[in-house]
Amino acid sequence: MLKLKLHWQILIAIAIAVVAGWLTDEQTRLFGIQALAIYDFAGTLFINALKMLIVPLIMSSIIVGVAGIGSSGDLGRLGGKTLVYYLTSSLLAILVGLLLVNLVEPGVVDGEPARDILAFETDGEAVAAKIGQADGSAIAEIFLRMVPPNVISAAANGQMLGLIFFSLLFGYFMTRVDHGTAEPLYSFWNAVHHVMLRMTEWVMMFAPIGVFGLVARTVSKTGFEAAGPLVLFALTVFSALVIHALLTLPTLVRMFARVPAYRLFGAMAPALMTAFSTASSSATLPITMESLEKNAGVSNRTSSFVLPLGATINMDGTALYECVAAMFIAQAYGLELSFSVQFVIVMTALVTSIGVAGIPSASLVAIAIILAAVGLPVEALGVLFVFDRILDMCRTSVNVFGDSCGAVIVARLQGEEGILESAPASRRTA
Ligand code: ASP
């Protein structure tokens, strides 16, 4: 039987949802049940399933990621440089996104928050009050929330900052105990992580149904007005990704690797196109390695350390997207985006982008974490599905390009010669 790829299924679900939402209103009943209630049920079930994954997924991926870096033997100079590059480039990506989303304000329509247009359920004032409490308008408050007095209650109450901090520490200190003690812990968390990835894939199989419910509900409540802010949001993400890929990353390569960065685009073209079509940096990894070694001339020693690590923990495009998406939803709720709220969004985007898996749509779980961290209702992320696939394809290409820039920089800092010396075409025919 012909099995359609998931993203086609989701696109078809969106198209059907638009028609269904357009044909129904609050009075419409199907088999005696209000149509809106059916949409709500499907959407909420799907969002609940995503929320269910968050705690074990984020804990296991952060613990395995951090403990893995420490135990990979070759940490020393190579590891240190790689980590500094990853954090710096992801932070720069987030800042580009933050700047653009503040300038464009896709969540605001005619000076009013787009909450009603996007059919967000929860009443904005209640949300604002919650954020007001959670925010405390002071950076000191954030640090207090970061160190939870009780990690179990932090997990149970969705206090993600505390949970992330605990997981980072746990992973780090696993590398500080002797190997025999750490080994079973590593196997355990690694196994949890793998099972959680499978569970995420399984939940994503229901995305077409969930997305149908979420989109049909929005269209049925507001008609097509919702498209305006969503298109603006997608354009904001796209422009920020382009600025990061064409300006920020090449500047870093020029400054630290002192090689002509534009040649890297040609060298990495096969990997960038694969990333674009698969929306998965993990699936692209073999091609990323091949392009970097064969076309760009980076040694296997560097690429085999920097790239697999990068494919899991360095995601510039994803970090940028998470920040813009969370800010968009916050703007649409009409929140006052104080410095400390934006600070939490930036920091959570940075840390969760480390924990995001290199598979399609993985950032949706991370966005749920950010929304929970600043006290916004997770349900709001339903609207992001409309443009998720196309933006996923773009951000994954930026993720892969960011990893290859990192490998070139680290290789040059390690003293490698002959990188990007000739254009890739002449290299191939040589
Ligand atoms: N699809 C992305 C990747 O594989 C992750 C995401 O942002 O959803 O790099």
Image: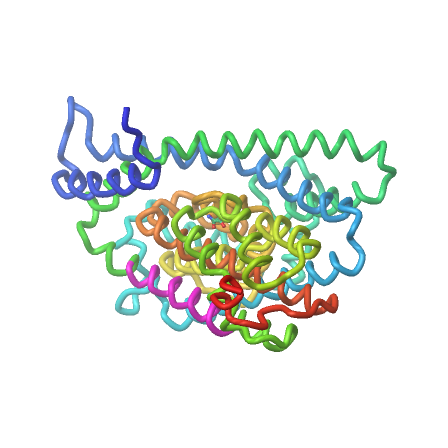
Q: Main secondary structure of the magenta part?
A: helix
Quadrant in the rendering for residue 229: bottom left
Closest to the observer: 364 or 118?
364
Q: Where is residue 175 in the image (x, y as percent from the top left)?
A: 80, 44
Residue 78, magenta (yes or no): no
Q: What stretch is highlighted in magenta?
A: 231-247
Residue 241, magenta (yes or no): yes
Q: Point out the image quarter for the N terminus.
A: top left
Quadrant in the rendering for residue 256: bottom right
Residue 137 in view of the camera: no
Quadrant in the rendering for residue 137: bottom right
Q: Position of residue 401 (x, y in %)?
A: 51, 60
User: In this rendering, is residue 84 above or below 65?
Assistant: below
Residue 428 in view of the camera: yes
Closest to the observer: 311 or 53?
311
What residue is drawn where x is 21% and y is 46%? 219
